Amino acid sequence: MAEQQTVPAAEATPTPDQMIVPTSDFRRRVEAESKVKVGACYGCKKCSNGCPVTFAMDYHPYQVVRYVQLGLPERLENSKTIWVCASCQTCLTRCPNEVDLPRLMDYLKETVVKQGRDPAEKRTRLFHQLFLREVKARGRVFEGSLMARYMLKSGGMFGSEAFKNAKLGLAMLRRGRMKLLPAGTKDRRWIKDLKKGPGGDR
Ligand code: SF4
Ligand code: SF4
């Protein structure tokens, strides 16, 4: 059966004064720095049709690649999509040209952070920062502390969200998906390397 093509809300037919003149500078820079073969994409949309989180995106994954090809960084810097991507690798598995979209999304997120811009999804960046802090402190994530800090800083300690989060935490404890006490890692040398790497101080 033929795949159903998704139609993104953000795509509309441009009027003549909205016509885009493509430039290749941005694509060349992104390809050189991220090592993602953006130019290999021919727009088949298999990535978007397999992505499980397009419902929460403002641009679909194939559009992210397209905007890099066209040289439109401003659309991506302000996009929710790069933060919503769950790095599940489904798009990469489906892509006939091996365009590494998860890596491209990471690269674009890093660019926003390096430029000191406000991300379109502040809570996702907060979660990433707290996750990294946990790894750097103990070498592994303690979900209890991660969720408590996240809820405190994101305002999730109040109202119905707090109740929902507490219920989720209890369910995780019951199923053994979360420990009561944190555990560290014996070999801490790689943690030092992690702190030296890209984004290590954040
Ligand atoms: S699946 Fe690959 S080639 Fe097809 S649109 Fe997506 S990135 Fe481009
Ligand atoms: S890696 Fe990101 S863009 Fe690709 S399918 Fe998963 S969530 Fe969608």
Image (cartoon, grey):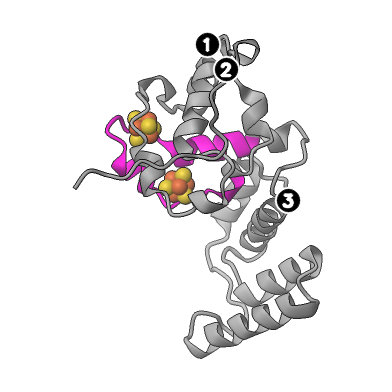
Asked whether disc 1 touches disc 3, contact meaning CB atoms under 8 Å apart, the reply is: no
Asked whether disc 1 touches disc 2, contact meaning CB atoms under 8 Å apart, the reply is: yes
Q: Judging from the image, what secondary structure is the residue with disc 2 in?
A: loop
- Is 104 magenta? The answer is yes
Mark 2 or 3, nearer chain start:
2
Which residue bears the numbered disc 2? 71
* Marker disc for residue 24: 1
Q: Tell me the magenta residue range.
A: 83-110
Q: Which amino acid, mark 3?
A: Lys
Q: Where 26 falls versus 83 (above or below)?
A: above
Q: CA distance from mark 2 to mark 3?
A: 25 Å
Mark 1 or 2, nearer chain start:
1
Q: Which amino acid, mark 1?
A: Ser
Q: Which amino acid, mark 2?
A: Gly
- Residue, x 49% and y 32% (percent of image)? 63
- Is 102 magenta? The answer is yes
Q: Nearer the viewer, residue 35 or 157?
A: 157
Q: Where 139 falls versus 31 (above or below)?
A: below
* Marker disc for residue 122: 3
Q: Main secondary structure of the magenta part?
A: helix
Mark 1 or 3, nearer chain start:
1
